[in-house]
Image (cartoon, grey):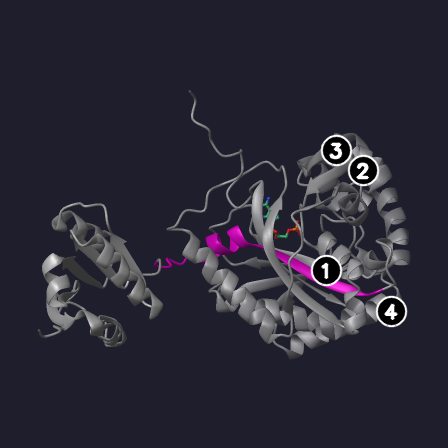
Amino acid sequence: MTTLRSVKGMKDYLPKEVPAYRRIEEAFARVMQRSGFREMRTPIVEPTALFVRAIGEVTDVVEKEMYSFQHHDEALTLRPEGTAGVVRAYLQNNLGNDEPVTKVFYQGAMFRAERTQRGRYRQFHQLGAEVFGDPSPAADADLLVTLVVFLREIGVSSPEVILGSIGGKATRAAFRESLVDFLTPKLATMSEESKRRILTNPLRILDSKHPGDRAACEGAPSILDVLDADDQSHFDALRRYLDALAVPYRVDRGLVRGLDYYSRTLFEIKGATEKLGAGDTLLGGGRYDGLVEELGGRATPAIGFAAGLERLVIATEENVAPPRIDVFVASEGAVGRALALANELRSHGISVECDGRGASVKAQLRRANAVDARFAIVLGDREVSDGVADLKDLAARTSTSVALSGMAAAAKAGLEGPPAAGEQAVSS
Ligand code: AMP
Protein backbone atom coordinates (compact mmCIF):
# COMPACT_ATOMS: atom_id res chain seq x y z
CA MET A 1 0.00 0.00 0.00
CA THR A 2 1.42 3.44 -0.85
CA THR A 3 1.89 5.71 2.13
CA LEU A 4 -0.19 8.86 2.07
CA ARG A 5 1.52 12.22 1.97
CA SER A 6 0.36 15.75 2.72
CA VAL A 7 -1.21 17.77 -0.08
CA LYS A 8 1.36 19.57 -2.27
CA GLY A 9 2.26 22.94 -0.80
CA MET A 10 0.74 22.11 2.60
CA LYS A 11 3.27 21.38 5.27
CA ASP A 12 3.39 19.91 8.73
CA TYR A 13 4.36 22.14 11.63
CA LEU A 14 6.44 19.83 13.79
CA PRO A 15 6.89 20.12 17.57
CA LYS A 16 10.40 21.52 17.15
CA GLU A 17 9.12 24.26 14.80
CA VAL A 18 5.92 25.30 16.53
CA PRO A 19 7.54 27.33 19.37
CA ALA A 20 8.86 29.81 16.77
CA TYR A 21 5.34 30.20 15.36
CA ARG A 22 3.77 30.53 18.79
CA ARG A 23 6.30 33.16 19.83
CA ILE A 24 5.26 35.35 16.89
CA GLU A 25 1.53 34.73 17.34
CA GLU A 26 1.77 35.70 20.98
CA ALA A 27 3.81 38.83 20.25
CA PHE A 28 1.24 39.79 17.61
CA ALA A 29 -1.70 39.43 20.01
CA ARG A 30 0.19 41.41 22.63
CA VAL A 31 1.16 44.30 20.34
CA MET A 32 -2.26 44.55 18.70
CA GLN A 33 -4.08 44.56 22.03
CA ARG A 34 -1.73 47.28 23.23
CA SER A 35 -2.89 49.34 20.22
CA GLY A 36 -6.59 48.84 20.95
CA PHE A 37 -7.39 45.91 18.66
CA ARG A 38 -9.47 42.94 19.80
CA GLU A 39 -9.23 39.42 18.41
CA MET A 40 -11.92 37.83 16.28
CA ARG A 41 -12.21 34.54 14.40
CA THR A 42 -14.20 33.73 11.29
CA PRO A 43 -14.88 30.45 9.45
CA ILE A 44 -12.29 28.91 7.15
CA VAL A 45 -15.01 28.15 4.60
CA GLU A 46 -17.10 30.96 3.13
CA PRO A 47 -19.47 31.28 0.18
CA THR A 48 -17.43 31.54 -3.03
CA ALA A 49 -19.41 34.64 -3.99
CA LEU A 50 -17.94 36.52 -1.02
CA PHE A 51 -14.40 36.30 -2.40
CA VAL A 52 -15.46 36.92 -5.99
CA ARG A 53 -17.21 40.12 -4.91
CA ALA A 54 -14.63 41.29 -2.41
CA ILE A 55 -11.34 40.39 -4.06
CA GLY A 56 -12.47 40.94 -7.65
CA GLU A 57 -13.21 38.55 -10.47
CA VAL A 58 -10.13 39.46 -12.51
CA THR A 59 -7.41 38.81 -9.92
CA ASP A 60 -4.87 36.01 -9.67
CA VAL A 61 -6.46 34.81 -6.45
CA VAL A 62 -9.99 34.47 -7.79
CA GLU A 63 -9.08 33.38 -11.31
CA LYS A 64 -6.55 30.71 -10.47
CA GLU A 65 -5.83 30.13 -6.83
CA MET A 66 -9.01 29.39 -4.92
CA TYR A 67 -9.87 26.00 -3.47
CA SER A 68 -13.54 26.01 -4.39
CA PHE A 69 -16.01 23.17 -4.21
CA GLN A 70 -19.68 22.43 -4.43
CA HIS A 71 -21.34 21.10 -1.30
CA HIS A 72 -24.94 20.13 -2.06
CA ASP A 73 -26.36 23.37 -3.45
CA GLU A 74 -23.71 25.67 -1.98
CA ALA A 75 -20.63 26.99 -3.83
CA LEU A 76 -17.96 27.21 -1.13
CA THR A 77 -14.30 28.25 -0.96
CA LEU A 78 -11.48 27.77 1.54
CA ARG A 79 -10.63 31.35 2.46
CA PRO A 80 -7.65 32.69 0.48
CA GLU A 81 -7.38 35.78 2.72
CA GLY A 82 -8.97 37.17 5.85
CA THR A 83 -10.44 40.58 5.04
CA ALA A 84 -13.50 39.41 3.08
CA GLY A 85 -14.63 37.14 5.92
CA VAL A 86 -14.03 39.81 8.57
CA VAL A 87 -16.06 42.36 6.58
CA ARG A 88 -18.87 39.82 6.14
CA ALA A 89 -18.82 39.12 9.89
CA TYR A 90 -18.68 42.85 10.70
CA LEU A 91 -21.88 43.34 8.68
CA GLN A 92 -23.67 40.16 9.73
CA ASN A 93 -23.09 40.88 13.43
CA ASN A 94 -23.64 44.65 13.20
CA LEU A 95 -20.31 45.30 14.87
CA GLY A 96 -20.40 48.88 13.61
CA ASN A 97 -23.45 49.56 15.80
CA ASP A 98 -21.53 48.89 19.02
CA GLU A 99 -18.84 51.49 18.46
CA PRO A 100 -18.14 53.97 15.67
CA VAL A 101 -14.61 52.66 15.22
CA THR A 102 -14.09 48.89 15.28
CA LYS A 103 -10.55 47.54 15.46
CA VAL A 104 -10.04 43.78 15.18
CA PHE A 105 -7.18 41.38 14.58
CA TYR A 106 -7.20 37.74 13.52
CA GLN A 107 -4.87 34.89 12.84
CA GLY A 108 -5.49 31.72 10.89
CA ALA A 109 -4.91 29.40 7.97
CA MET A 110 -5.42 30.66 4.39
CA PHE A 111 -5.44 28.61 1.19
CA ARG A 112 -4.18 29.52 -2.25
CA ALA A 113 -3.24 27.09 -5.01
CA GLU A 114 -0.06 28.98 -5.90
CA ARG A 115 3.22 27.70 -7.30
CA THR A 116 5.07 26.78 -4.16
CA GLN A 117 8.54 27.96 -3.18
CA ARG A 118 10.31 28.93 0.03
CA GLY A 119 7.92 31.25 1.87
CA ARG A 120 5.02 30.48 -0.49
CA TYR A 121 2.70 27.64 0.37
CA ARG A 122 -0.80 26.49 -0.51
CA GLN A 123 -1.85 26.43 3.12
CA PHE A 124 -0.24 29.28 5.01
CA HIS A 125 -1.14 31.44 7.98
CA GLN A 126 -1.84 35.12 8.14
CA LEU A 127 -1.82 37.54 11.01
CA GLY A 128 -4.05 40.43 10.09
CA ALA A 129 -6.03 43.38 11.37
CA GLU A 130 -8.80 45.67 10.18
CA VAL A 131 -9.94 49.13 11.31
CA PHE A 132 -13.51 50.08 10.39
CA GLY A 133 -15.04 53.53 10.61
CA ASP A 134 -11.97 55.78 10.64
CA PRO A 135 -11.17 57.52 7.34
CA SER A 136 -8.32 59.62 8.75
CA PRO A 137 -4.69 59.37 7.69
CA ALA A 138 -3.96 59.16 11.43
CA ALA A 139 -5.59 55.70 11.45
CA ASP A 140 -3.25 54.62 8.65
CA ALA A 141 -0.21 56.00 10.47
CA ASP A 142 -1.24 54.39 13.76
CA LEU A 143 -1.65 51.01 12.06
CA LEU A 144 1.72 51.30 10.31
CA VAL A 145 3.62 52.30 13.44
CA THR A 146 1.99 49.40 15.29
CA LEU A 147 3.19 47.01 12.59
CA VAL A 148 6.73 48.34 12.69
CA VAL A 149 6.75 47.96 16.49
CA PHE A 150 5.47 44.38 16.11
CA LEU A 151 8.13 43.49 13.55
CA ARG A 152 10.90 44.97 15.69
CA GLU A 153 9.56 43.17 18.73
CA ILE A 154 9.85 39.78 17.01
CA GLY A 155 13.37 40.56 15.75
CA VAL A 156 12.96 41.90 12.20
CA SER A 157 15.79 44.39 12.55
CA SER A 158 15.09 46.92 9.82
CA PRO A 159 11.52 46.75 8.59
CA GLU A 160 10.98 48.98 5.58
CA VAL A 161 7.54 50.36 4.79
CA ILE A 162 6.87 50.75 1.08
CA LEU A 163 4.09 53.24 0.61
CA GLY A 164 1.80 54.16 -2.23
CA SER A 165 -1.64 55.48 -2.93
CA ILE A 166 -4.09 54.16 -5.44
CA GLY A 167 -6.47 57.10 -5.06
CA GLY A 168 -10.22 56.96 -4.95
CA LYS A 169 -12.61 55.59 -7.59
CA ALA A 170 -12.51 58.68 -9.83
CA THR A 171 -8.73 58.88 -9.75
CA ARG A 172 -8.43 55.21 -10.60
CA ALA A 173 -10.78 55.49 -13.57
CA ALA A 174 -8.77 58.39 -15.02
CA PHE A 175 -5.49 56.61 -14.36
CA ARG A 176 -6.74 53.43 -15.93
CA GLU A 177 -7.33 55.27 -19.18
CA SER A 178 -3.89 56.83 -19.28
CA LEU A 179 -2.29 53.48 -18.44
CA VAL A 180 -4.18 51.72 -21.24
CA ASP A 181 -3.06 54.45 -23.67
CA PHE A 182 0.53 53.98 -22.54
CA LEU A 183 0.55 50.17 -22.73
CA THR A 184 -1.53 49.53 -25.85
CA PRO A 185 1.29 50.25 -28.37
CA LYS A 186 3.49 47.75 -26.50
CA LEU A 187 1.00 44.88 -26.40
CA ALA A 188 2.88 42.70 -28.90
CA THR A 189 5.73 42.00 -26.47
CA MET A 190 3.52 41.49 -23.44
CA SER A 191 2.27 38.28 -21.83
CA GLU A 192 -0.96 36.66 -22.97
CA GLU A 193 -2.40 37.33 -19.55
CA SER A 194 -1.66 41.05 -19.77
CA LYS A 195 -3.13 41.22 -23.27
CA ARG A 196 -6.35 40.04 -21.70
CA ARG A 197 -6.02 42.20 -18.60
CA ILE A 198 -5.55 45.39 -20.53
CA LEU A 199 -9.29 45.14 -21.14
CA THR A 200 -10.38 43.83 -17.78
CA ASN A 201 -7.95 45.05 -15.10
CA PRO A 202 -5.01 46.99 -16.55
CA LEU A 203 -3.64 48.14 -13.15
CA ARG A 204 -2.72 44.56 -12.36
CA ILE A 205 -0.23 44.61 -15.28
CA LEU A 206 1.98 46.94 -13.21
CA ASP A 207 2.42 44.07 -10.75
CA SER A 208 3.33 41.43 -13.36
CA LYS A 209 6.64 39.58 -13.06
CA HIS A 210 6.72 38.66 -16.80
CA PRO A 211 9.88 40.18 -18.39
CA GLY A 212 7.95 41.50 -21.42
CA ASP A 213 5.40 43.14 -19.12
CA ARG A 214 8.13 44.60 -16.92
CA ALA A 215 9.83 46.14 -19.95
CA ALA A 216 6.53 47.50 -21.24
CA CYS A 217 5.77 49.11 -17.87
CA GLU A 218 9.06 50.98 -17.83
CA GLY A 219 8.28 54.69 -17.75
CA ALA A 220 4.57 54.05 -17.22
CA PRO A 221 2.60 56.90 -15.66
CA SER A 222 2.25 56.78 -11.88
CA ILE A 223 -1.07 57.07 -10.16
CA LEU A 224 0.66 59.38 -7.69
CA ASP A 225 0.79 62.02 -10.42
CA VAL A 226 -2.97 62.06 -10.91
CA LEU A 227 -4.29 61.89 -7.33
CA ASP A 228 -7.15 64.32 -6.80
CA ALA A 229 -6.86 67.02 -4.15
CA ASP A 230 -8.49 64.96 -1.37
CA ASP A 231 -6.44 61.83 -2.11
CA GLN A 232 -3.30 63.95 -2.25
CA SER A 233 -3.89 65.67 1.07
CA HIS A 234 -4.70 62.29 2.69
CA PHE A 235 -1.42 60.89 1.37
CA ASP A 236 0.57 63.97 2.40
CA ALA A 237 -0.88 63.93 5.91
CA LEU A 238 -0.05 60.23 6.28
CA ARG A 239 3.54 60.96 5.27
CA ARG A 240 3.79 63.81 7.79
CA TYR A 241 2.53 61.51 10.58
CA LEU A 242 4.98 58.78 9.61
CA ASP A 243 7.84 61.29 9.60
CA ALA A 244 6.80 62.54 13.03
CA LEU A 245 6.64 58.96 14.32
CA ALA A 246 10.06 58.18 12.80
CA VAL A 247 8.61 55.25 10.83
CA PRO A 248 11.08 54.41 8.05
CA TYR A 249 9.29 54.34 4.68
CA ARG A 250 9.86 54.93 1.02
CA VAL A 251 7.28 55.87 -1.57
CA ASP A 252 6.94 53.42 -4.47
CA ARG A 253 5.41 55.19 -7.45
CA GLY A 254 4.40 51.93 -9.08
CA LEU A 255 2.96 50.09 -6.08
CA VAL A 256 -0.21 48.16 -6.85
CA ARG A 257 -1.45 45.17 -4.93
CA GLY A 258 -3.00 41.87 -5.88
CA LEU A 259 -6.51 42.42 -4.59
CA ASP A 260 -9.07 44.73 -6.17
CA TYR A 261 -10.63 46.28 -3.11
CA TYR A 262 -8.00 48.86 -2.21
CA SER A 263 -8.43 52.64 -2.30
CA ARG A 264 -6.02 55.42 -1.30
CA THR A 265 -3.26 54.12 1.01
CA LEU A 266 -1.39 50.99 -0.05
CA PHE A 267 1.59 49.54 1.73
CA GLU A 268 3.92 46.60 1.99
CA ILE A 269 6.64 45.91 4.51
CA LYS A 270 9.77 44.02 3.60
CA GLY A 271 12.39 42.87 6.04
CA ALA A 272 16.03 43.50 5.26
CA THR A 273 16.82 39.82 4.94
CA GLU A 274 18.35 37.58 2.32
CA LYS A 275 16.60 34.58 3.75
CA LEU A 276 13.35 35.01 1.87
CA GLY A 277 14.62 35.50 -1.67
CA ALA A 278 11.82 36.45 -4.05
CA GLY A 279 9.07 36.16 -1.49
CA ASP A 280 10.47 38.85 0.77
CA THR A 281 7.24 40.74 1.37
CA LEU A 282 6.41 40.17 5.00
CA LEU A 283 3.07 41.89 4.95
CA GLY A 284 0.81 43.98 2.80
CA GLY A 285 -2.31 46.00 3.17
CA GLY A 286 -4.14 49.17 2.49
CA ARG A 287 -7.29 51.19 2.74
CA TYR A 288 -10.50 49.78 1.29
CA ASP A 289 -13.05 52.52 1.77
CA GLY A 290 -15.55 51.04 -0.71
CA LEU A 291 -15.60 47.37 0.28
CA VAL A 292 -18.08 47.43 3.16
CA GLU A 293 -20.64 49.16 0.96
CA GLU A 294 -19.90 46.81 -1.92
CA LEU A 295 -20.71 43.87 0.33
CA GLY A 296 -24.06 45.38 1.28
CA GLY A 297 -23.28 47.60 4.28
CA ARG A 298 -23.38 51.34 4.92
CA ALA A 299 -20.48 53.24 3.40
CA THR A 300 -17.72 52.63 5.94
CA PRO A 301 -14.08 53.57 5.53
CA ALA A 302 -11.63 50.82 6.47
CA ILE A 303 -7.98 49.87 6.42
CA GLY A 304 -6.27 46.56 7.06
CA PHE A 305 -3.24 44.41 6.49
CA ALA A 306 -2.13 40.79 6.53
CA ALA A 307 1.28 39.29 7.25
CA GLY A 308 2.49 35.83 6.30
CA LEU A 309 3.33 33.96 9.48
CA GLU A 310 5.66 31.50 7.73
CA ARG A 311 7.62 34.40 6.24
CA LEU A 312 7.95 36.05 9.63
CA VAL A 313 9.32 32.80 11.02
CA ILE A 314 11.85 32.53 8.16
CA ALA A 315 12.81 36.20 8.49
CA THR A 316 13.42 36.02 12.22
CA GLU A 317 14.71 32.44 12.23
CA GLU A 318 15.20 32.51 15.94
CA ASN A 319 15.85 29.22 17.59
CA VAL A 320 13.07 29.04 20.07
CA ALA A 321 13.64 26.23 22.55
CA PRO A 322 10.61 24.03 23.10
CA PRO A 323 9.18 24.36 26.61
CA ARG A 324 11.10 22.10 29.04
CA ILE A 325 9.69 19.27 31.06
CA ASP A 326 10.14 20.23 34.72
CA VAL A 327 9.93 16.79 36.31
CA PHE A 328 10.20 13.29 34.87
CA VAL A 329 8.52 10.63 36.99
CA ALA A 330 9.99 7.18 36.34
CA SER A 331 8.24 4.19 37.84
CA GLU A 332 9.59 0.93 39.12
CA GLY A 333 6.48 -1.14 39.60
CA ALA A 334 4.36 1.56 41.25
CA VAL A 335 2.82 2.85 37.99
CA GLY A 336 -0.50 3.88 39.53
CA ARG A 337 1.25 5.87 42.28
CA ALA A 338 3.60 7.41 39.71
CA LEU A 339 0.63 8.64 37.67
CA ALA A 340 -0.96 10.05 40.83
CA LEU A 341 2.26 11.84 41.82
CA ALA A 342 2.70 13.22 38.28
CA ASN A 343 -0.81 14.63 38.30
CA GLU A 344 -0.44 16.09 41.75
CA LEU A 345 2.70 17.94 40.62
CA ARG A 346 0.89 19.08 37.45
CA SER A 347 -1.91 20.52 39.60
CA HIS A 348 0.75 22.86 41.04
CA GLY A 349 1.63 24.11 37.54
CA ILE A 350 4.68 21.89 37.15
CA SER A 351 5.11 20.19 33.74
CA VAL A 352 5.54 16.47 34.22
CA GLU A 353 6.21 13.51 31.94
CA CYS A 354 5.43 10.14 33.49
CA ASP A 355 6.76 6.88 32.11
CA GLY A 356 4.51 3.88 32.69
CA ARG A 357 5.84 1.63 29.93
CA GLY A 358 7.42 -0.76 32.39
CA ALA A 359 10.87 -0.14 30.87
CA SER A 360 14.05 -0.38 32.95
CA VAL A 361 14.84 2.59 35.21
CA LYS A 362 17.95 3.20 33.11
CA ALA A 363 15.88 3.40 29.92
CA GLN A 364 13.39 5.71 31.61
CA LEU A 365 16.12 8.06 32.81
CA ARG A 366 17.56 8.12 29.28
CA ARG A 367 14.17 9.43 28.18
CA ALA A 368 14.24 11.99 30.99
CA ASN A 369 17.47 13.34 29.49
CA ALA A 370 16.10 13.18 25.96
CA VAL A 371 13.11 15.37 26.87
CA ASP A 372 15.47 17.75 28.68
CA ALA A 373 13.76 17.28 32.03
CA ARG A 374 15.16 19.37 34.89
CA PHE A 375 14.38 16.88 37.69
CA ALA A 376 13.63 13.17 37.83
CA ILE A 377 11.97 11.05 40.49
CA VAL A 378 12.10 7.25 40.49
CA LEU A 379 9.05 5.86 42.26
CA GLY A 380 9.19 2.21 43.30
CA ASP A 381 7.39 0.17 45.93
CA ARG A 382 10.02 1.11 48.54
CA GLU A 383 9.52 4.86 47.97
CA VAL A 384 5.77 4.40 48.18
CA SER A 385 5.96 2.49 51.48
CA ASP A 386 8.56 4.91 52.98
CA GLY A 387 6.68 7.95 51.70
CA VAL A 388 10.01 9.42 50.60
CA ALA A 389 11.72 9.59 47.18
CA ASP A 390 14.83 11.17 45.67
CA LEU A 391 14.39 14.36 43.69
CA LYS A 392 17.26 14.14 41.20
CA ASP A 393 18.57 17.36 39.72
CA LEU A 394 19.57 16.12 36.25
CA ALA A 395 21.72 19.13 35.40
CA ALA A 396 23.62 19.33 38.69
CA ARG A 397 23.73 15.53 39.04
CA THR A 398 22.73 15.74 42.69
CA SER A 399 19.76 14.38 44.50
CA THR A 400 17.72 15.30 47.55
CA SER A 401 15.59 13.00 49.64
CA VAL A 402 12.10 14.50 49.87
CA ALA A 403 8.87 13.36 51.55
CA LEU A 404 6.27 12.60 48.84
CA SER A 405 3.84 14.94 50.61
CA GLY A 406 6.30 17.82 50.15
CA MET A 407 7.45 16.89 46.62
CA ALA A 408 5.49 19.61 44.81
CA ALA A 409 6.89 22.32 47.10
CA ALA A 410 10.44 20.98 46.79
CA ALA A 411 10.22 20.74 42.99
CA LYS A 412 8.79 24.26 42.80
CA ALA A 413 11.56 25.63 45.00
CA GLY A 414 14.16 23.88 42.84
CA LEU A 415 12.60 25.22 39.63
CA GLU A 416 12.39 28.75 40.95
CA GLY A 417 15.99 28.78 42.18
CA PRO A 418 18.88 29.67 39.89
CA PRO A 419 19.10 27.26 36.94
CA ALA A 420 21.55 24.48 37.67
CA ALA A 421 24.48 24.86 35.33
CA GLY A 422 26.33 21.79 36.43
CA GLU A 423 28.42 23.62 39.01
CA GLN A 424 25.51 24.48 41.27
CA ALA A 425 25.00 21.44 43.44
CA VAL A 426 21.75 21.02 45.35
CA SER A 427 23.13 19.37 48.43
CA SER A 428 21.42 16.28 49.72
P1 AMP B 1 -1.86 39.26 0.44
O1 AMP B 1 -3.08 38.75 1.17
O2 AMP B 1 -1.65 38.62 -0.91
O3 AMP B 1 -1.75 40.74 0.45
O4 AMP B 1 -0.61 38.74 1.28
C1 AMP B 1 -0.25 39.26 2.51
C2 AMP B 1 0.94 38.50 3.03
O5 AMP B 1 0.60 37.14 3.21
C3 AMP B 1 2.12 38.48 2.07
O6 AMP B 1 2.93 39.61 2.25
C4 AMP B 1 2.83 37.22 2.52
O7 AMP B 1 3.66 37.48 3.64
C5 AMP B 1 1.70 36.33 2.93
N1 AMP B 1 1.36 35.39 1.86
C6 AMP B 1 0.57 35.58 0.78
N2 AMP B 1 0.48 34.47 0.03
C7 AMP B 1 1.23 33.53 0.65
C8 AMP B 1 1.55 32.17 0.39
N3 AMP B 1 1.05 31.51 -0.66
N4 AMP B 1 2.37 31.51 1.26
C9 AMP B 1 2.88 32.14 2.34
N5 AMP B 1 2.61 33.43 2.65
C10 AMP B 1 1.80 34.12 1.81
Residue 257 lies in magenta, yes or no? no
Q: Position of residue 224 (x, y in %)?
A: 79, 60
Q: Is residue 339 left or right of residue 404?
A: right
**Mark 1: amino acid:** Gly
Q: Between disc 1 and disc 2, whose residue precedes?
A: 2
Above or below 316: residue 148: below
Numbered tag placed on residue 230 in the rendering: 4
Can you identify the residue that label 3 sits on? 72
Please provide the residue range marked out in magenta: 300-321
Q: CA distance from mark 1 to mark 4?
A: 17 Å
Quadrant of the frame with the N terminus: top left
Dot 3: element: loop
Can you identify the residue that label 2 sits on? 197
Q: Between disc 3 and disc 2, whose residue precedes?
A: 3
Q: Residue at x 53, y 34 (%)?
A: 7
**Mark 4: amino acid:** Asp
* Tags 2 and 4 touching, CB below 8 Å: no
Dot 2: element: helix
Numbered tag placed on residue 407 in the rendering: none
Q: Between disc 1 and disc 4, whose residue precedes?
A: 4
For the view shown, which residue lies furthest in the bottom direction?
A: 244
Q: Between disc 2 and disc 4, whose residue precedes?
A: 2
Name the residue nearer the viewer: 262 or 195: 262
**Mark 3: amino acid:** His
Q: Kindly report which numbered mark, 3 or 4, lies closer to the viewer in this rendering.
A: 3
Can you identify the residue that label 1 sits on? 286
Above or below 87: residue 209: above
Residue 302 lies in magenta, yes or no? yes
Q: CA distance from mark 3 to mark 2?
A: 33 Å
